[in-house]
């Protein structure tokens, strides 16, 4: 659950708690108001009865019975309440109940039960009536249970409706405000996700709120530092690769010029010795033939070593023909067990250094991995332009690689390919097919001469 929904539910929970507390407060005030009205009614009756006795004793008029029920009728007490006057000996009881006003509003049964448990709707206000130090009796004012429950339910409905609308409006307003305040968080998260995917050039915009602004500035500063470190590491790795290629070129040239010439000289001498031995000493012909075989084997091994150290074909005949020769050699080497195919766009021979050699190395290492580990029957290599400034290399086979073991079984070859791609500023993606087989997708930036590349792409 995201932060906005959590905040919204918490706001609604707080609103519900406020609503319940407000409902409880309204019911409590309704109960207290009813009790207060009952007490005030008893107090007013006491005053009226005192006035009646004063008139009786001052005028000696005892024609009206005490207490006078007309006085009780003139009092507007609590609706539905009953007023009683009990004499001191309770030998005389006068009672009067106000008219019950029937309200069409009917409360639920559960509300009536809860209200009677929490409050006292059958409250009875009692006052002892005395005059001239003589106690005449007691005044009792009893509330009507149904009228009090109906009044409490009516008040609760009115307040509940107003508060519900108010709390809902406030909750929506607060939610919209929080949503607006949290909008920078969405931009920050999206920016961090892009940075996680390697797009360190992504920058988070500045915000008006101080906390978000400081957060974006800190993240941008960290991304800039990380990007600078990555660029420096990439440049260092590229320099190391270039230095390695130069060292390979130097070693291959020395081996070709020195060791290769020596082997050629040995081969020439062996041929000369063989010709002489046929005439003068036929018994050593077998030894000379052995020397010739060893020399030929060393020459073959030297050519393979020189090819691995420095693919001369890339410099001499270009990347396209070099890769084509490499594919043909692997098809011959595997004896038909694995069928290698190559698809390459035009214009690859004008790639700037050090792309050609590194692309050759990547394809070479990929083919070696397929031959050693994949047990594939088919493998395809595609090298194509996406646009004038980017190319894609796809290497795909139908071997035994599985997704769950891909990261665990990543060997030195794949790690070396990943290091080369990173050094060249590219991106590598490795995935597997559902039925087995590895797919490498390599994206590399390229800045060839614009005019030449455009012409080749159109052709």
Image (cartoon, rainbow, N blue to C red):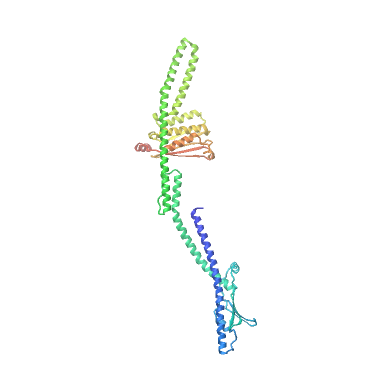
Regarding residue 11, the answer to whether it shows in the image is yes
**Observer-nearest of 55 and 271:** 55
**Residue farthest toward the front in the current orientation of the protein:** 133
Quarter of the image with the C terminus in it:
top left
Q: Position of residue 396 (x, y in %)?
A: 48, 36
Q: Position of residue 156 (x, y in %)?
A: 54, 68
Q: Position of residue 56 (x, y in %)?
A: 57, 87
The residue under the point 48% across, 10% down is 281
On screen, residue 22 above or below 215: below
**Residue farthest toward the bottom in the current orientation of the protein:** 60
The residue under the point 55% across, 77% down is 40
Asked where in the image residue 89 lies, by quadrant, the reply is bottom right
The residue under the point 50% across, 66% down is 162
Regarding residue 376, the answer to whether it shows in the image is no
The residue under the point 49% across, 17% down is 290
On screen, residue 295 above or below 321: above
Total numbered labels placed on residues in the image? 0
**Observer-nearest of 139 and 283:** 139
**Residue farthest toward the top in the current orientation of the protein:** 280
**Observer-nearest of 178 and 417:** 178
């Amino acid at each position: 659950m995201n932060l906005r929904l959590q905040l919204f539910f918490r706001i609604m929970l707080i609103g519900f708690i406020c609503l319940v507390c407000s409902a409880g407060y309204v019911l409590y005030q309704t109960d207290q108001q009813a009790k207060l009205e009952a007490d005030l009614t008893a107090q007013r009756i006491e005053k009226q009865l005192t006035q009646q006795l004063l008139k009786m004793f001052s005028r000696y008029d005892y024609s009206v019975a005490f207490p006078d029920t007309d006085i009780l009728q003139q009092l507007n007490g609590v609706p539905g309440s009953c007023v009683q006057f009990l004499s001191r000996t309770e030998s005389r009881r006068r009672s009067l109940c106000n008219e019950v006003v029937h309200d069409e509003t009917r409360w639920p049964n559960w509300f009536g039960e809860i209200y009677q448990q929490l409050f006292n709707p059958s409250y009875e206000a009692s006052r002892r009536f005395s005059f001239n130090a003589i106690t005449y009796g007691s005044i009792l004012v009893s509330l009507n249970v149904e009228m009090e429950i109906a009044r409490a339910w009516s008040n609760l409905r009115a307040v509940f409706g107003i508060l519900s609308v108010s709390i809902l409006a406030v909750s929506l307003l607060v939610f919209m405000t929080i949503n607006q305040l949290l909008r920078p968080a969405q931009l920050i998260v999206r920016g961090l996700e892009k940075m996680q995917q390697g797009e360190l050039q992504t920058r988070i915009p500045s915000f008006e709120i101080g906390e978000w602004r400081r957060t974006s500035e800190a993240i941008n500063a960290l991304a800039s530092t990380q990007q600078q470190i990555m660029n420096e590491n990439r440049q260092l790795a590229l320099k190391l690769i270039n230095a390695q290629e130069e060292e390979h070129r130097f070693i291959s040239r020395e081996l070709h010029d020195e060791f290769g010439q020596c082997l050629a000289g040995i081969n020439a001498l062996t041929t000369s010795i063989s010709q002489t031995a046929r005439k003068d000493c036929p018994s050593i012909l077998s030894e000379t033939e052995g020397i010739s075989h060893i020399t030929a084997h060393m020459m073959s091994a030297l050519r393979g070593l020189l090819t691995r150290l420095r693919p001369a074909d890339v410099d001499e005949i270009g990347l396209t023909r070099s890769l084509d020769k490499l594919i043909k050699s692997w098809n011959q080497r595997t004896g038909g067990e694995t069928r290698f195919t190559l698809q390459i766009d035009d214009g690859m021979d004008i790639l700037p250094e050090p792309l050609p050699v590194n692309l050759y190395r990547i394809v070479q290492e990929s083919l070696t991995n397929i031959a050693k580990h994949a047990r594939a029957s088919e493998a395809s290599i595609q090298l194509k332009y996406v646009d004038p400034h980017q190319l894609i290399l796809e290497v795909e086979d139908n071997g035994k690689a599985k997704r769950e073991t891909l990261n665990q079984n990543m060997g030195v070859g794949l790690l070396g390919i990943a290091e080369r791609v990173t050094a060249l500023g590219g991106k590598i993606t490795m995935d597997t097919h559902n039925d087995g087989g590895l797919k490498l997708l390599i994206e590399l930036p390229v800045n060839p001469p614009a005019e030449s590349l455009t012409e080749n792409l159109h052709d």
